[in-house]
Amino acid sequence: MHLPSVGIDAIALALPQKFISLDELALARGVPPEKYQTGLGVEKMAIPGFEEDPVALAVNAARQLFRSSGCSPQQIGLCLVGTETPVDYAKPISIYLHRMLGLPSSCRVFETKHACYGGTAGLFTALEWIVSGSAQGRSALVVCTDIACYPLQSPGEPTQGAGAIALLLSANPRLLAIDPASSGVYSHEVYDFWRPLQHKNAIANGPLSIQSYLEALTNAYKNWKERNPQHAPLLRSCYHVPYGKMARKAHQHRLSLEKKNLSGSAHKEEIETSLVFPAQVGNMYTGSLYLALASLLHHEAPLLEGSWIGLFSYGSGCTAEFFAGKVSEQAGSTMKKLHVEYAFRNRQKIDIATYESIRLQAEHKAVPLVAESIPIEADLSQNVVFRGFDQSERRLYQNVPLHTKPANTNR
Ligand code: HMG
């Protein structure tokens, strides 16, 4: 099959420094721990502090991408941010990145939105920009950044999370080639999950959201099959992962559409390595599918070189896309250099009381006013934190050193 040689060249993550154990949350909520572990497939949940807002997370993921991939900000001609946690009605997160990464003035920047599909909207826009010839040899940066939030003690609480994923998209990609013209798409309007402008937390109709996700998968996959009747087998699959069990259910559902024998654990290997990272983070909304991809490639890239994998992106509301990617021949050596596992270093477990007080502060405490503006250099060797607002409600950020403590295995 003819495949234009465009796709994901590199990937990087930024995660909040704090997390909670879902076993401890279960205990605090009076729920059997198996419900979260097995019933939902979650183990740890990333908890962002005040200083880890969606802009800081996005900048930190993108700076890590430049540090690890060898790409320079000067090579970027398009910078898109997919998010459903915007910080302003008008000013997009992408323009903060433009400044804090030192992107060229001739770079096009904007934000893309459709719930968890927002990052995929950016990905396809960027791929088509490259295929069209507009890129003229330049690469695109797509960053997915979100904080997933439901009310404390609600059914959605164990399915929160946060983080950012940065994707470098280019011709002759070192990780995954994707043909933007051959995906399967499905959209229809539904109130399964929404985040009204006046609310900090999302509102979800849980059962309807699960039903809507599976219905969207059925239709996007059928559309993909119609467009690619002779496609090579998909050895692995990555799904949007609000929680691991949803992806497992989705995979079973897709196999049942193929009328495949579902007995035993024969198909487990097709998704399990993609769910290792998500179980340690929770729902990253726009970044969740790409966290699953990072997890899959981190664990299995050398084995999968030259093979096809399937990807399913779902955004509540709803729109969805099923597409295939071919793992590049140098994906194994590239993943080794990218060190996506660094994002899990130095994370610190907090107890449930601390988590609750962080959440209550975020809901009720005013963001600090910082008297003086803070000059910020596009210094890729440092991380960025949010400091507060100035008198005119401009957001202020500061560079801080990267963590220097040795890596530990406290993923
Ligand atoms: P719940 O009330 O915990 O649901 O809400 P439940 O009581 O049905 O339990 C969940 C599972 O745990 C069930 O398994 C139980 O059987 C099992 P299932 O029937 O699904 O296979 N269970 C146990 N297992 C082992 N031991 C036990 C035990 N007890 C029960 N003792 C729900 C779950 C996901 C609905 C809730 O957390 C929620 O509303 N989350 C937010 C919405 C969501 O994540 N929806 C997912 C699809 S929509 C989507 O992915 C889009 C999204 O990311 C947003 C966007 O697009 O921007 C959310």
Image (spheres, rainbow, N blue to C red):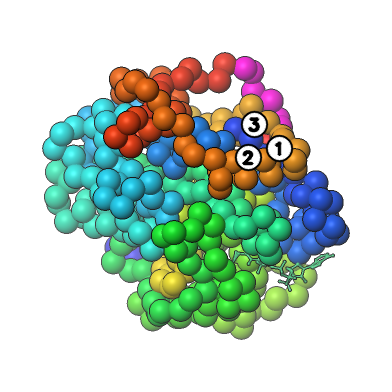
Whether tag 3 and tag 2 are in contact, CB under 8 A, the answer is: no
Q: Rounded to the nearest whole Å, what is the CA distance between mark 3 and mark 1?
A: 15 Å
C-alpha gap between disc 2 and disc 1:
6 Å
Q: Residue under circle 3?
A: 347
Determine which of the numbered discs, if any, sits on residue 228 in the image. Answer: none
Residue 142 location, x and y as percent?
Answer: 34, 46
Q: Can residue 256 be spotted in the picture?
A: yes
In this orientation, which residue lies closer to the viewer: 259 or 51?
51
| Magenta region, main secondary structure | loop
Q: Is residue 245 left or right of residue 11?
A: right
Q: Is residue 328 visible?
A: no
Q: Which mark is residue 354?
A: 1
Name the residue tied to disc 2.
358
Q: Which residues are magenta?
A: 405-410
The residue at the point 46 percent across, 31 percent down is 368
> Residue 315: which quarter of the image?
bottom left
